[in-house]
Structures are given as structure tokens and as C-alpha cells.
Amino acid sequence: MPQGRPAGVPDDGLTTRERRNRPLVIVHTGEMKGKSTAAFGLALRAWNQGWPVGVFQFVKSAKWRVGEEAALRALGRLHEQTGEGGPVTWHKMGEGWSWIQRPGTEADHAADAREGWAQIRRDLAAETYGLYVLDEFTYPMKWGWVDVDDVVETLRARPGRQHVVITGRDADPRLVETADLVVEMTKVKHPMDAGQKGQRGIEW
Amino acid sequence: MPQGRPAGVPDDGLTTRERRNRPLVIVHTGEMKGKSTAAFGLALRAWNQGWPVGVFQFVKSAKWRVGEEAALRALGRLHEQTGEGGPVTWHKMGEGWSWIQRPGTEADHAADAREGWAQIRRDLAAETYGLYVLDEFTYPMKWGWVDVDDVVETLRARPGRQHVVITGRDADPRLVETADLVVEMTKVKHPMDAGQKGQRGIEW
């Protein structure tokens, strides 16, 4: 349906305009593909609105997200050159976060993840981005590297109009509770069940 | 997990390489958001591989997909100018398909949908694209405008290496049966339940 209709109007003292523009916390979870691709699809909409997009990629494999990264970086360059769309900043854990000057050695991943989260906190406080893509961020929470209560509290208290999308399996119930929108990608059928292997252009 | 592992190796006579490169039919269905955004996220990967991307947008609302369209068209222009990525072609039902010269009047939507499918058939036969995004294509099938058996047969018989992703609710069981990968986007929580309205940058 082109225009969603709310099920009811809450008694929250907000005007329609305020309610419409309320910044969202979105979670893409579930066992199946599409969690991150849908987040990067959202980034296209944000880019088109001219919002600064900040991607924080909490994954280590070099192959992952190469397609999305190349395309979104290209859109960011286009913005720099022509003013079209918005700026794109891409932070990657695997190679050391972009704001840390140190070689990409086999580092302490827990410390890396905590550094990533600390930077996100700083950016949220500074209202750096209009959309944050926290890709695979459920895992550092699941593994206890990043404190879920701190994440939830920080998201709830974030100022201004900043949308945040978090992807990954096994989203913590506290994160689900605080999120405005939670989608679960569930499996109906997967080609690996039929012996299919991952392939370029599809998985990365 | 960075590298998916197939559950077993089928006795299909294919080499690992052939199996890896097998073109896929992908369906994103379910009641929840993320079906189309994930398809456009896949388009970023395809673009980065240099594959020609063909989008067929089976929706009528002018507001829908404006973000994805602007961003993917920008990537297509970038390809024309610099050779980076692949070409992008965007076909839209609401304004008359791009290959039909006629004013975008309140036309017969069933005929429009059939024309769209006829063009997809021609493009599949000609191996025009590496990735087809058939956005909201489940609906013309559901409404009987496009014959499901014809779609399934055409997809099964398509030549070469053409990936096809179809989005929309209520995917026909025959389509699910023929697809290699089917993801269902299910609702855990939706802001419209709390009176939230759709907003730019998120819904379009």
C-alpha cells in the first residue's frame, strides 16, 4: 500500500508533523539474507534526501559488503562533486576504524567493537549523520563486547533527528523493545540447502 | 557467517564452479518492510560487478522508490561517464513503461502489467541484464493480470546467467516452488502500530 495508515493515533501530545518526523530505530534481524541489503537500500533513500549517511561495518571479512561499499562510496563522491544526494562515510572494523590510525593487524576484536560503539556515541551526540547503518552490530552485543543497556539508553537519549538501523541475527530483547521497527528475515527456501555456494553479485 | 557452507552437495552433475555461478531466482515476500529495499541493496552488488541492472517497477505511486530510483540512476550515469560499475535501466509502470511512447494517463493497469511482463520476456530471451529487479511483481500475478505458469516457465527456461529478484506480498506457491531463494519479511514491531506515519527517507 503506497500510504501506510496508522492503526490508531496515540495520546502522546505530538502533532502529526512531529509524529511523522520522529526519528526511528530500526532492527533487521532473523536468520535469513536481506537484513543488511535492506539496510543499504534504506541508505539509498537517505542519500536521496541529502542526509549524511554513516555506515559502521561490524564485520571482519574483506569480501563482505564490497558491492554496497563501492556503490555507496561512489554516491558519496557524486555528492562531493555535484552536490547531488548526501555525503557517505564508511567505517570498517576489519581494517581498523577509519578514525583510528593504526595498521590493520589481527587485533582484539572486542576492543575494536567497543571503539566502534564509542565513535557511534560521539557521532550521535554531535548529530553527525541523518542515517546510521550499524551493520552486524547485534553480534558485539550478543558476545558481551558492547553493553546492551548502554546502547539502548544512548539510542533513547539521542538528540535531534537521527535514524538508526541495526542489522544482525539474535537481536537482544532489550534492543527489540526500544526499537520502533523490527523486521525479521525468515527462511522459506535457501539455495545452500540444495548445495548452492555463495557467489559474487549475490552474497557480496 | 562470512562464507556460507552448503548443507550437502547434490548429485546434479554440476561442477563446483557451475554450481557457484548458477543464476538465481530470488523472491522477497511477507507482510513487512524490507522486501524492495533488500532487492535494491542486491542491485548495488550487481552494479559493482558491472552487470547491467534492469528495474521493472510494478507500482503506481509516484512517491514510491524515488530514493532508490534517484540513487540507482545516479550510479547508472556514473557508469556511463567513468565506466565504473554497470549500466542501470529503470522501467516504471506508473508513467508508462519507458519503451512505450504514450502519455501516462489513467490507463488499463492490467494491460500495463502485461506489457511489462512481455518486455521482461523479451529481455530475458535477449539476455539484456545480469540482474532483474521485478519490484512488486507478485501483485499482477495475484490479480490474474499476468499468468503465473507463464512466469515460472519463462524463468525456468531463461538462457545464460541472469539473476532475477521478485518482490511483493503473497508470492504464489508456484513461484516459491521455482525460486532458488525465498525470504519472508515478517513483522516483529511496526511504528504504525504506535500511530507513526510514513516518512521521507524511510518509506520512500
Image: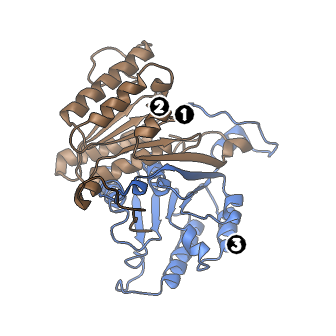
Chain colours: A blue, B brown
Closest to the camera, between mark 2 and mark 3, is 2
Residue A71 in the image: x percent, y percent?
A: 32, 55
Residues at marks 1 and 2 touching, judged by CB atoms closer than 8 Å = yes
Between residues A137 and A25, which one lies in front from this camera angle?
A137
Q: Would residue A171 be visible to someone looking at this image?
A: yes
Q: Which of marks 1 and 3 is in front?
A: 1
Whole-angstrom CA distance, mark 1 to mark 3, is 38 Å
For mark 2, name the chain.
Answer: B
Circle 2: residue type: Thr
Q: Which percent across, then down, holds residue A59? A: 44, 71
Do marks 1 and 2 both belong to one polypeptide chain? Answer: yes
Asked if marks 2 and 3 touch (Cβ < 8 Å), the reply is no
Q: In the image, are marks 2 and 3 on the same chain?
A: no
Choose between B43 and B198: the one closer to the eye: B43
Chain letter of the residue beneath label 1 in the structure image: B
Who's the residue at 47% across and 71% down the image? A58
Disc 1 from disc 2: Cα separation: 7 Å
Label whose residue precedes the other's in the sequence (1 or 2): 2
Task: Please give the residue where the numbered disc 2 appears in the rendered image.
Answer: B138
Q: In this view, does A25 lie to the left or right of B113?
A: right
Image vertical order of residue B154 relative to residue A132, above or below = above
Residue named by callout 3: A149
